[in-house]
Image: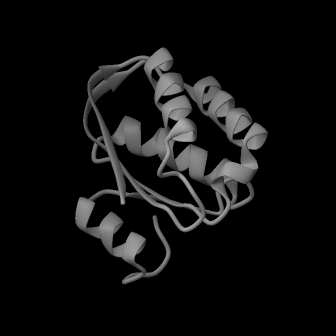
Amino acid sequence: MLRSSLSGRITQDEIRAFQAQLLGHERLHPDARCLVDLSEVESSDASGTTVQEALQLAREHRQSFEGVRIAVVAKRAASFGLSRMYELRNDGDLVPDFGVFRTREEALGWLRGDSGAPG
């Protein structure tokens, strides 16, 4: 399983860099499971525009996400809301298995296939 986390105050540039790193990671392959932990993010300058840019990058690299399952843990309202915006606008089209969760346990269960739909 590929695990990553962001913490503290994160910027739009850090979000872009994170997505680029994920796309270039050697362990990103069909059937990969990824846990992205945002539970320690205190604040961000991310916005709806940031989400749109992330979706555009995913659209350009759609084939890289085929068969990949990504779970995001976001405890704070802002991180959870922006992550859910990505999930809803994605609509399973770009990253077919993308879920947002409040707890690490829920996310890991979903990645293992132990539980139902995210949200």
Q: Which quarter of the figure is the N terminus placed in?
A: bottom left
Residue situated in front as seen by the camera: 8 or 102: 8
Task: State the count of labels.
Answer: 0
Measuring from the top left, give residue 85's x and y in whole percent: 57, 45
Above/below status of 43 relative to 64 = above
Q: Is residue 33 above or below residue 75?
A: below
- Nearer to us in this view, 79 or 97: 97
Way the structure is coloured: one colour
Tell me the quarter of the picture where residue 52 sits. Answer: top right
37 relative to 47, above or below: below
Residue drawn at 24 percent across, 67 percent down: 105
What is the quadrant of residue 49 in the picture?
Answer: top right
In percent of width and height, residue 48 lies at 60, 29
Q: Which residue appears at 26% of the width and 59% of the height?
A: 103
> In x, y percent, where is residue 78?
39, 35
Residue at (50% x, 62% y) in the render: 32
Left or right: 11 as drawn, with respect to 108:
right
Question: Residue 72 placed where, x, y %?
Answer: 40, 52
* Residue 42 sits in quarter: top left
